[in-house]
Image: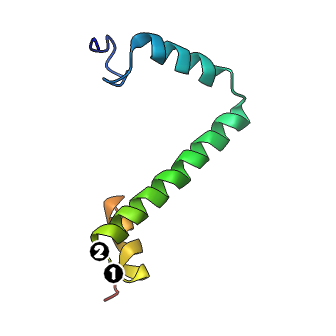
Amino acid sequence: MAPATEPWIPADTTPEAWAEQTRLIRRLTPGERVARSLERSAWMRAAMLAGIRMRRPEASEHEVRREFARLLGFEIPGGP
């Protein structure tokens, strides 16, 4: 696959595929775009939490949430 010509196109995506994806996204209503963003955010949150639990099976739910917050750049004071 040839490298993308624009820096914002993922390296594993052809310019033609990117153009089609962009065309489809532009057809969405604002509400549909928000819904898609929220779905992706929920999926990413679930994937991150699952990854933390997989790497630290002994961690309590509080510790998992604390690590999640740390990965997002937040610090939660206190706790074990």
Kind of element beneath mark 2: loop
Is 3 displayed left or right of 46 in the figure? Answer: left
Question: Which color scheme does this rendered protein use?
Answer: rainbow
- Count up the numbered dots: 2
Instruction: Name which quarter of the figure residue 52 lies in.
Output: bottom left
Instruction: Name which quarter of the figure residue 35 lies in.
Output: top right
Q: Residue at (38%, 74%) from the top-left corner?
A: 64
Q: Residue furthest bottom?
A: 80
Q: CA distance from mark 1 to mark 2?
A: 6 Å
Marks 1 and 2: CB-CB under 8 Å? yes
Instruction: Examine the rendering and report whether any part of residue 75 can be seen.
Output: no
Q: Are there few (<14), some (14-19), or many (20+) residues within 10 Å of tag 2? A: few
Residue 2 placed where, x, y %? 27, 11
Q: Residue at (52%, 50%) from the top-left corner?
A: 41
Quarter of the image that includes the N terminus:
top left
From this view, report whether residue 40 is shown above or below residue 67: above
Instruction: Name which quarter of the figure residue 68 lies in.
Output: bottom left
Residue 67 placed where, x, y %? 33, 70
Mark 2 sits on what residue? 56
Instruction: Examine the rendering and report whether any part of residue 39 can be seen.
Output: yes
Residue 14 placed where, x, y %? 39, 15
Quarter of the image that includes the C terminus:
bottom left
Q: Are there few (<14), some (14-19), or many (20+) residues within 10 Å of tag 1? A: some
Mark 1 sits on what residue? 59
Residue type highlighted by circle 1: Ala
Is 68 displayed left or right of 42 in the figure? Answer: left
Residue 71 placed where, x, y %? 32, 60
From this view, report whether residue 50 is shown above or below residue 17: below
Residue type highlighted by circle 2: Arg
Q: Residue at (33%, 81%) from the top-left corner?
A: 59
